[in-house]
Amino acid sequence: MIGEHRDRLLRFIKKHIPENIFNKLAPAYHYSLAFLAALVYRFPSRKIFIIGVTGTKGKTTVIELLGAMLEEAGHKVALSNTLRFKIGNESQRNIFKMTMPGRFFLQRFLRKAVEEKCNYAILEMTSEGAKQFRHRFISLNALIFTNLAPEHIESHGSYEKYREAKLSIAKKLQHSSKKRKFIVVNADDKEAGKFLDISIKEKYRYALQDAEPHKLKKEGLSMTLHDTPIQSHLSGLFNIYNILAAATCAKQLGIGTETIKQTIETFKGIPGRMEYIDEGQNFTVVVDYAHTPDSLEKVYDTFHRAKKICVLGATGGGRDKWKRKEMGSIAEKFCSTIILTDEDPYDENPLEIVHNVQEGITRPISRIIIDRREAIKTALKRAEIGDAVLITGKGTDPYIMGPAGTKIPWSDAEVAREELKKLKTQS
């Protein structure tokens, strides 16, 4: 009921107040909603150990890994991330197309976690959420910083403002009323120093050298943690960093190396993040959320020995246009064949979006197929023994977002499985 009244109020304000005035009033509006939400649900974050995870990439995987480590150690955990909302044994898919949901949703989520007697709540915290004060009145105990790369530049106005939005989350940890506070930082990231500069006593770093010796395999990886050899089902160098982030935090929470090792070795990965689709075909098919130039390059580089057939959309319509051409250039560098397709056009012409991506491709190796199912089907039909079909951009996104708020239910993984099964019956 509160949410409905809030939405009606927001529509009324936007309709009757000029945009420049609304933008000036927006911070007070967002702050007031954050306070009201916390007040209605009686400031639940004060009653539970809260761990925030922020950065450009890896947040969801780190949350799922850390949650699994805590549960392996016998704790009851609540998780909120791009993939799902989980309280104890109850889990529901995140279908909001929003990594960090609204203030009332978050405070209600935390209140339920407290009532269900969870020991920990682990929250994915974003720059967009911070911009709208969704992190206010959430009392943090700990924060994990994974990395920072350009994203949401048009929304924030510059990379520096994007970085400041992320840093504002760290500053909320600094000013938290919790007795114990600590931050875990990727020391290899160029912005690590800014996050380590916050004024709290406990600061913990992790870096790739902490995993040496390590080895990346076609499917999976091996690494060393606290002088203990570990095998993981996860793939890619970036997942070594994700494992280190979760393990470093877990260690500070008193979880032993054997428990951490057991969790890592049994953790199969999460949907939409380097998700292998296997229907008995003789080539590799992977679905991944990669939606920034850096993350796209890391996914492609993981399969550097295979001939790659790449299904590539771009950022959603009306946002981050700056990176479209760059995504095309990266695809050209790594892929033997590129199939450009629809992703989330919103109110923008999808053809215009893919043409922007195509501007970064100088060789005649790309083809435009706007229908995403048809694009995936074509990629799979072209694949030969040992090839890698890499379907990027959406991960577990539940919809393709179209004009005027329209949305089509969608799953890259399900579509890939369906088309692979059709190919098997045709062969």
Image (cartoon, rainbow, N blue to C red):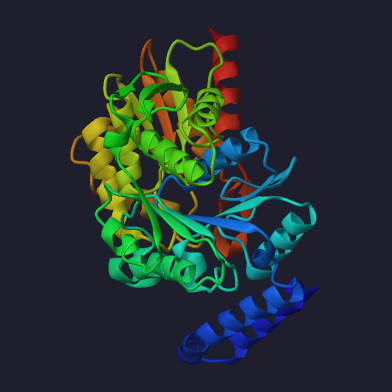
Q: Where is residue 272 in the image (x, y as percent from the top left)?
A: 52, 37
Toward the top, the furthest residue is 427
Residue lying at 54% horizontally and 60% vertically, measured from the top left: 141
Quadrant of the rendered image containing residue 290: top left
Q: Can residue 392 be seen in this view?
A: no
Q: Where is residue 78 in the image (x, y as percent from the top left)?
A: 67, 49
Where is 380 relative to 130, above or below? Answer: above
Q: Where is residue 60 in the image (x, y as percent from the top left)?
A: 51, 45
Residue lying at 52% horizontally and 66% vertically, measured from the top left: 129
Instruction: Return the residue nearer the eye: 238 or 66.
Output: 66
Instruction: Return the residue nearer the eye: 363 or 276.
Output: 276
Q: Is residue 358 visible?
A: yes
Name the image quarter holding the N terminus: bottom right
Horizontal side, residue 269 vs residue 91: left or right = left
Toward the left, the furthest residue is 362
Where is 227 relative to 130, above or below? Answer: above
